[in-house]
């Protein structure tokens, strides 16, 4: 008798913005298959034979090709290595581990050791590194170290591993911003022209909604910075907070008066919403 293997699918999958707004029924079915099929691994990288997957899904081989291309090129949540016939779910490790410990770490080491495509391991590492560094789960740093040990064993050059570091650093730098004339880093002043208004925005939310969020949260800062980079203003943040507080406070929706909902991908919709509107129901944390 074969051993039963369990894979975790958080219920918030069904509330994710990308799933709600972009995924077709076929996409949802395929994503659930990618996360739970019998060939999966603890790290989300595993051998993926298209002919076998087509049979298990009840699809044609051509349909599987289309789905892989869509999830890789449009959604950017997987990578497929045609040379080794392996696939990687880039964010899988955010959700596949609930509790750390040596048994789990041993499984991760075993799974990584069996993967042929070093490029897929690098892609997952680059995608997960920011999350690991910001995580308050003690075992996430251990997982990061396991990946780095694999790179040492495979003699992967550091510059190949850190190709995306500059992109990640853009979300992690200090509370500073520069005028457009300082896009060239060699011409930037030694001091920032202004600081991003993290505290003012979060304090305004806490006052209006009766919440206790911290402006020092890296995740909250990243959301605020992303909207400011899209040219939204401090007044825009306050309007969104006032609009959604008026709509959701003291209702079942009050739990969504939080930075990840208010300052996420639906921000512009909330900004252009009348205070009395009941549209734009929030969709929970981002999976992908």
Image (tube, rainbow, N blue to C red):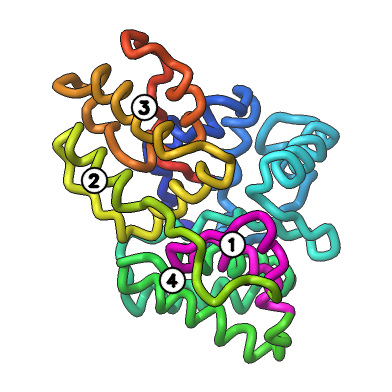
Q: Is residue 68 left or right of residue 207?
A: right
Quadrant in the rendering for residue 178: bottom right
Looking at the image, do the residues carrying marks 2 and 1 touch, with CB atoms under 8 Å apart? no
Specify whether residue 173 is painted magenta: yes
Looking at the image, do the residues carrying marks 2 and 3 touch, with CB atoms under 8 Å apart? no
Looking at the image, do the residues carrying marks 2 and 4 touch, with CB atoms under 8 Å apart? no
Q: CA distance from mark 2 to mark 1?
A: 31 Å
Q: Is residue 121 visible?
A: no
Q: Is residue 31 left or right of residue 86?
A: left
Quadrant in the rendering for residue 256: top left
Give the numbered dot on residue 203: 2
Within 10 Å of the Cα at label 2, are there few (<14), some (14-19), or many (20+) other Cα atoms? some
- Residue identified by numbered label 4: 133
Q: CA distance from mark 2 to mark 4?
A: 25 Å
Looking at the image, do the residues carrying marks 1 and 3 touch, with CB atoms under 8 Å apart? no
Of labels 1 and 3, the one closer to you: 3
The residue at the point 63 percent across, 48 percent down is 77
Q: Quadrant of the C terminus?
A: top right
- Residue identified by numbered label 1: 127
Q: CA distance from mark 4 to mark 1?
A: 12 Å
- The magenta segment is 160-185
């Amino acid at each position: 008798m074969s051993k039963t293997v369990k894979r975790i699918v958080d219920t918030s999958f069904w509330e994710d913005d990308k799933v709600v707004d972009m995924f077709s029924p076929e996409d949802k079915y395929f994503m659930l298959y990618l996360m739970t099929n019998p060939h999966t691994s603890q790290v989300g990288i595993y051998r993926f034979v298209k002919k076998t997957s087509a049979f298990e899904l009840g699809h044609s081989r051509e349909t599987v090709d289309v789905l892989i291309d869509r999830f890789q090129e449009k959604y950017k949540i997987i990578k497929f290595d045609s040379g080794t016939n392996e696939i990687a779910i880039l964010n899988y490790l955010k959700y596949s581990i609930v509790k750390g410990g040596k048994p789990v770490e041993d499984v991760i080491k075993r799974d990584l050791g069996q993967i042929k495509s070093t490029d897929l391991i690098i892609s997952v590492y680059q995608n997960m590194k920011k999350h690991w560094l910001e995580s308050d789960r003690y075992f996430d740093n251990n997982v990061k170290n396991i990946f780095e040990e694999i790179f040492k064993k495979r003699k992967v050059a550091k510059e190949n591993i850190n190709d995306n570091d500059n992109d990640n650093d853009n979300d992690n730098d200090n509370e500073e911003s520069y005028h457009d004339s300082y896009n060239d880093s060699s011409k930037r002043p030694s001091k920032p022209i202004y600081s991003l208004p993290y505290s003012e925005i979060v304090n305004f939310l806490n006052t209006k909604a009766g919440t206790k969020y911290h402006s020092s949260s890296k995740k909250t800062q990243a959301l605020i910075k992303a909207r400011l980079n899209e040219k939204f203003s401090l007044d825009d943040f306050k309007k969104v907070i006032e609009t959604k507080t008026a709509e959701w406070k003291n209702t079942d929706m009050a739990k969504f008066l939080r930075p990840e909902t208010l300052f996420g991908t639906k921000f512009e919709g909330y900004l252009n919403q009348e205070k009395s509107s009941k549209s734009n129901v929030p969709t929970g944390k981002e999976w992908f």
